[in-house]
Amino acid sequence: MEKGVVLKKGLFVTVEGGEGAGKSTCLDYVKQLLEQKGINAVFTREPGGTEIGEDVRSILLNKKYLGMSADTELLLMFAARAEHIDKKILPNLSDGKWVISDRFTDATYAYQGAGREIGPERVALIEDWVQGELRPDMTLLLDLPVEVGMERATKRGELDRFEVEQMSFFERVAAIYRQRAQAEPQRFRVVDASKVITEVHEQIKSIFEAKFSELGI
Ligand code: Z5A
């Protein structure tokens, strides 16, 4: 599909948050909400979502590459994303399906832009080049204190190449997510992910009910 031309009919929703924020847990619930409403949706993730993207993901998360340069990491994220957009995101949106992605480019601003201190300008340059006009219609930010998320992630099992970073890295990530949510309140919906799962679900339900009513469905 030609870059910069977004023939979009479905809705593009992304879910973001720091380590252990509960994205996977929340996405299982979003799936139920959309099924109940009879909405045809495709669930996907980044980095990943395609065969090439999943291979790139395994490089990105592998602790064998702890010394990977920040620019290599940034470009691999966008290489996986280019494939994801061309092969999965745009074709499904133009078919009228909703596409729900566990992470997208806000994660690049947070992890590479802020965490790795590359800065937002270079991320924005590649974003425009790879995505053309494509931006999420709605982004859920699962927000919680860094220590709580790390405790949950650590309890869950072995840590990946990102999860072994210092607390200061995760503090920079969390700060940029909050900053982006404040800068774009029309796109972001902030969820207090420190609450118990049932309360997190309640918040998600109200967000989707508001969206359904806005769209008249
Ligand atoms: N990355 C990047 O650097 N740049 C980019 O552009 C992109 C990604 C797209 C892989 O992402 C890594 O890629 C990620 C950023 C980087 N860094 N890391 N690590 P990922 O999304 O696949 O991996 P993740 O962030 O590590 O997600 P996660 O740890 O799998 O967390 P989660 O999906 O948000 O959480 P969860 O598995 O649903 O929950 C974690 C645990 O907490 C689990 O045991 C749950 O049962 C528990 N949980 C969940 N909710 C609750 C509540 N409310 N209370 C108590 N316990 C809970």
Image (cartoon, rainbow, N blue to C red):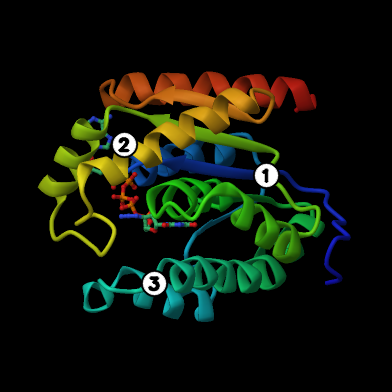
Residue at horizontal 45 percent and vertical 20 percent from the top? 203
**Mark 2 Cα-neighbour bin, 10 Å: few <14, some 14–19, many ≥20:** some
Amino acid type indicated by mark 1: Pro
Q: Position of residue 100 (x, y in %)?
A: 58, 49
Establish if 24 lies above or below 211. below
Q: Nearer the viewer, residue 40 or 13?
A: 13
Q: Does any portion of residue 130 appear in the rendered image?
A: yes
Asked whether, in this view, residue 68 is left or right of residue 88, the answer is: left
Q: Quick check: 189 above or below 114?
A: above
Front of the two marks 3 and 1: 3
Gap in angstroms between the C-alphas marked 2 and 1:
24 Å
Which of the 4 quarters of the picture holds residue 36?
Answer: top right
Residue at the disc numbered 2: 171
> Which structural element holds mark 3?
loop
Q: Nearer the viewer, residue 152 or 175?
A: 175
The answer to the question of whether label 2 and label 1 lie on touching residues, with beta carbons closer than 8 A, is no
Q: Residues within 10 Å of mark 3 (few under 14, many from 20)?
A: few
Residue 69 is marked as: 3
Question: 205 or 188, which lies in front?
Answer: 188
Identity of the residue drawn at 52% across and 34% down: 140
Q: Is mark 2 within 8 Å of ligand 1?
A: no
Q: Which mark is residue 136?
A: 1
Per the rendering, the mark at residue 190 is none
Amino acid found under the numbered disc labelled 2: Glu
- The first of marks 3 and 1 along the sequence is 3
The x and y percentages for residue 128 are 74, 57
Nearer the observer: mark 2 or 3; the answer is 3
Q: Residue at x 28, y 77 (%)?
A: 65
> Residue flagged by tag 3: what amino acid is it?
Ser
Residue plotted at (62% across, 43% down): 13
Give the image location of residue 171, x and y in percent. Answer: 31, 36
